Image (spheres, rainbow, N blue to C red):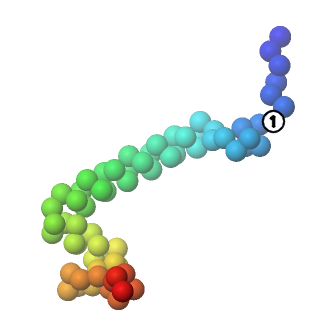
Amino acid sequence: MPTRASKSTNDLGLMTAAERKEVETFRKAARKVTREATRSRESAIQFLIDAGIFGKNGKPKKYFRAS
């Protein structure tokens, strides 16, 4: 007769099958965005502008500049 584990997967800090599926879905979406954003220099700059990291002039905003 199989014995039952004394702790659940959550108690052990392990992911459930649903959580693993959610992480894999996120990873695929992140890869797709990265591929599209890095397709060309222009698309990369536009992505950074849309994300608020670069200003409309195509240069990093003050907060993101190296000092």
With respect to residue 25, does 40 lie above or below?
below
With respect to residue 51, does 13 lie above or below?
above
Residue at the spot x=42%, y=48% of the render?
A: 27
Pick out the residue farthest to the front: 67
Residue at the spot x=59%, y=36% of the render?
A: 17
Residue at the spot x=83%, y=10% of the render?
A: 1
In which quadrant of the rendered image does the C terminus lie?
bottom left
Residue at the spot x=31%, y=51% of the render?
A: 32
Residue 7: x and y in percent read 81, 36
Disc 1: which residue: 7
Quick one: SS at disc 1?
A: loop
Residue type beneath disc 1: Lys
Residue 50: x and y in percent read 30, 74
In which image quadrant can residue 57 be found? bottom left
Residue sitting nearer the eye, 61 or 20: 61
Residue 52: x and y in percent read 35, 79
**Left or right of residue 8: residue 53:** left
